């Protein structure tokens, strides 16, 4: 049985906003806005997988090599990629490949769970964190008070990514970007361990026709209501018997 099917101990120490969704859905931008508004530390878990991918490519390791990429992940730290370009198209493609390896995901699992339990720099009176990725609400923090699944149509997501890429590669065809988006979706959704999927209790935010302000407006009442419930529960647990 995969370790990802085990039920982790409840995360009651901090208020976690878990955002999941496919590439270019807007979850990262939304996550950063949520974190800024509520003053919660923010973790883009994609950086972890991009970092492992960059280190693999930098050392001549094929992203498809499950054993060697897992070894890289086991010794990973953010300091090792401090000055690395982890947003390049090559690294982006490789990150989706390494993320499908069970060993890589297991190696990075503890890093993410530790961030959720004890967010660095969090307010001690109202500790919280915003974490985005592919399996935050289903695997990393299945007990998160807030779970948001942020998505958009493949065509909309490809257009967004294409507009970013043409700034440095003006000749890249939009059709190629759409092909890559669909291929990445297939890898993320089809992997055996922790596939990309919407948690049963996750709120859906479709950004196909929404800008970030509108997406944030949709997320805010969900978070506010959950934060009120969580704060009341935390106060109850801390009250004397």
Image (cartoon, rainbow, N blue to C red):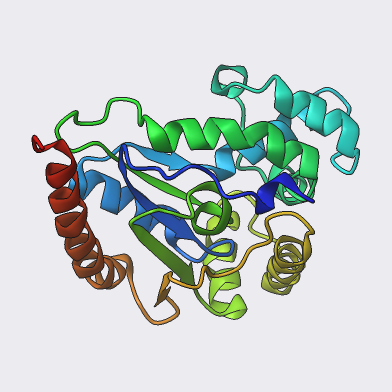
In the rendered image, the residue lying farthest to the left is: 240
Left or right: residue 214 versus residue 28 is left
Left or right: residue 28 versus residue 184 is left
Quarter of the view holding residue 195: bottom right
Q: Nearer the viewer, residue 196 or 58?
A: 196
- Could you tell me residue 129's position as x and y percent? 33, 42
- Could you tell me residue 183's position as x and y percent? 77, 67
Vertical order, 67 against 95 (above or below): above
- Could you tell me residue 189's position as x and y percent? 71, 67
Quarter of the view holding residue 48: top right
- Could you tell me residue 215's position as x and y percent? 31, 70
Residue in the picture at 68% in, 67% down: 181
Q: Nearer the viewer, residue 223 or 1?
A: 1
Vertical order, 221 against 46 (above or below): below
Residue in the picture at 45% in, 68% down: 150
Residue in the picture at 40% in, 62% down: 147
Figure disc tally: 0
Residue in the picture at 48% in, 42% down: 9
In the rendered image, the residue lying farthest to the front is: 241
Vertical order, 144 against 71 (above or below): below
Vertical order, 225 against 231 (above or below): below
Left or right: residue 211 versus residue 108 is left
Left or right: residue 80 versus residue 228 is right
For the C terminus, the image quarter is top left
């Amino acid at each position: 049985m995969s370790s990802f099917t085990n039920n982790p101990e409840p995360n009651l120490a901090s208020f976690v906003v878990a955002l999941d969704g496919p590439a270019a859905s807007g979850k990262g931008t939304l996550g950063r806005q949520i974190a800024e508004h509520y003053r919660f530390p923010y973790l883009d878990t994609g950086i972890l997988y991009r970092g492992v991918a960059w280190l693999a490519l930098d050392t001549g390791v094929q992203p498809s090599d499950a054993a060697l990429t897992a070894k890289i992940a086991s010794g990973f730290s953010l300091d090792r990629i401090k000055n690395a370009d982890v947003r390049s198209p090559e690294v982006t493609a490789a990150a989706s490949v390494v993320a499908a390896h069970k060993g890589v995901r297991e190696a990075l699992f503890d890093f993410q769970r530790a961030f959720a339990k004890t967010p660095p720099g969090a307010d001690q009176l109202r500790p919280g964190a915003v974490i985005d990725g592919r399996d935050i609400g289903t695997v990393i923090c299945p007990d998160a008070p807030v779970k948001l699944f942020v998505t958009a149509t493949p065509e909309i997501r490809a257009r967004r990514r294409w507009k970013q890429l043409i700034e440095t590669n003006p000749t890249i065809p939009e059709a190629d970007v759409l092909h890559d988006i669909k291929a990445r979706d297939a890898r993320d959704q089809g992997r055996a361990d922790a596939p990309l999927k919407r948690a049963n209790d996750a709120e859906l935010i479709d950004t196909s026709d929404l800008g970030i302000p509108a997406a944030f407006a949709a997320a805010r009442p969900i978070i506010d209501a959950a934060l009120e419930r969580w704060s009341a529960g935390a106060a109850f647990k801390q009250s004397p018997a």
